[in-house]
């Protein structure tokens, strides 16, 4: 899905995703991760595109509101997720990688397998077909999974803001989501870094510092 009129970058960009159940704390760290990454890549003339799913494009943001707020059939939900993802890939992710920039996304396809597959119980085979159709061989170069017991995550979320329809789900739902995340991490161990999100913010930041070295970020 490269852009036909774009010259390939001498050094290809990399695609990093942050994943985890609601309340695991990934959003606390993703902005700092992006800023540190941006400072390192500026030394070699590259930029970082920070984005999210659902969302990432005007159409994706409109679909995000539907997915997070409106009740719907589970297959409709999955189809909307992949529709937004296709737009995200074509309009944001692939052009950035072709330029040689890096992309950091707060959630990607692993979240659909975890939430719509593990949590909702939608067939993983159906999701795999959609994954292949929408993104082909494109996968993140690295996925950072914030793993946390759902009961701790729920306590963190309590009273923080008005919850969306996923955040209102039961502990059993989030247990299934977590299990599917961990299953995918085990199946693609070379792509995942699993972080114990029950640690302190400083301890997690120290682990993320090691990720920069693994990615070959200048200055790390």
Image (cartoon, rainbow, N blue to C red):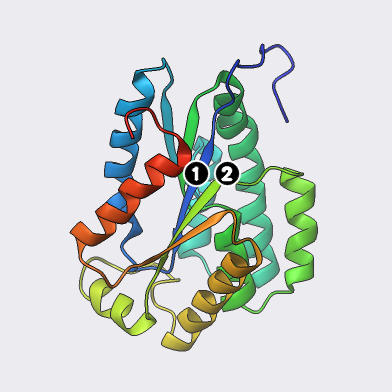
70 over 80 or under it: above or below: below
Q: Dot 2, how many residues are within 10 Å of its Cα: few (below 14), some (14-19), or many (20+)? A: some
Task: Out of 99 and 196, give the one closest to the viewer.
Answer: 196
| Residue 16: image tag | 1
**Whole-percent x, y for residue 65 in the image:** 46, 54
Secondary structure of residue under mark 2: loop
Q: Give residue 7's quadrant in the image.
A: top right
169 over 129 or under it: above or below: below
**Whole-percent x, y for residue 103 in the image:** 49, 35
Total marks placed: 2
As measured in the structure, the alpha-carbon distance from the residue carrying label 2 to the one carrying label 1 is 6 Å
Residue found at x 55% / y 61%: 111
Q: Give residue 186's quadrant in the image.
A: bottom right
The quarter in which the C terminus is drawn is top left
Task: Out of 176 and 195, give the one closest to the viewer.
Answer: 195
Query: In this view, which residue lies farthest toward the bottom?
Result: 172
200 over 170 or under it: above or below: above
Q: Of callouts 2 and 1, which one flags the residue occurring earlier in the amino acid sequence?
A: 1
Is 37 on the left or on the right of 214, as rendered?
Answer: left
Residue found at x 61% / y 23%: 98
Secondary structure of residue under mark 1: strand
**Whole-percent x, y for residue 36 in the image:** 29, 35
179 over 63 or under it: above or below: below
Q: Dot 1, how many residues are within 10 Å of its Cα: few (below 14), some (14-19), or many (20+)? A: many
Asked whether the residues under the numbered discs 2 and 1 touch, taking CB atoms below 8 Å apart as contact, a structural biologist would say yes
Q: Is residue 150 visible?
A: yes
Q: Is residue 28 visible?
A: no
| Residue 141: image tag | 2
**Whole-percent x, y for residue 132 in the image:** 78, 51
Residue found at x 73% / y 31%: 1
Is 78 on the left or on the right of 55, as rendered?
Answer: right
| Residue 179: image tag | none
């Amino acid at each position: 899905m490269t852009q036909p009129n774009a010259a390939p970058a001498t050094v290809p960009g990399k695609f990093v995703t942050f994943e985890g159940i609601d309340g695991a704390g990934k959003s606390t760290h993703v902005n700092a991760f992006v800023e540190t990454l941006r400072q390192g890549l500026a030394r070699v003339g590259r930029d970082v595109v920070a984005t999210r799913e659902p969302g990432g494009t005007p159409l994706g943001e409109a679909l995000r509101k539907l997915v997070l707020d409106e009740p719907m059939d589970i297959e409709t939900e999955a189809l909307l997720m992949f529709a937004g993802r296709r737009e995200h890939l074509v309009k944001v992710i692939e052009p950035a990688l072709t330029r040689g920039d890096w992309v950091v996304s707060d959630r990607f396809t692993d979240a659909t397998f975890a939430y719509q597959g593990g949590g909702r119980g939608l067939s993983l085979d159906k999701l795999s077909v959609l994954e292949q159709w929408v993104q082909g061989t494109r996968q993140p170069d690295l996925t950072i999974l914030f793993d946390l017991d759902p009961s701790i995550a729920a306590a963190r979320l309590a009273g923080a803001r008005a919850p969306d329809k996923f955040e209102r789900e039961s502990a059993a739902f989030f247990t299934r989501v977590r299990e599917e995340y961990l299953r995918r991490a085990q199946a693609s161990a070379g792509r995942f870094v699993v972080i114990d999100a029950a640690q302190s913010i400083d301890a997690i930041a120290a682990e993320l510092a090691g990720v920069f070295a693994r990615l070959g970020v200048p200055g790390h």
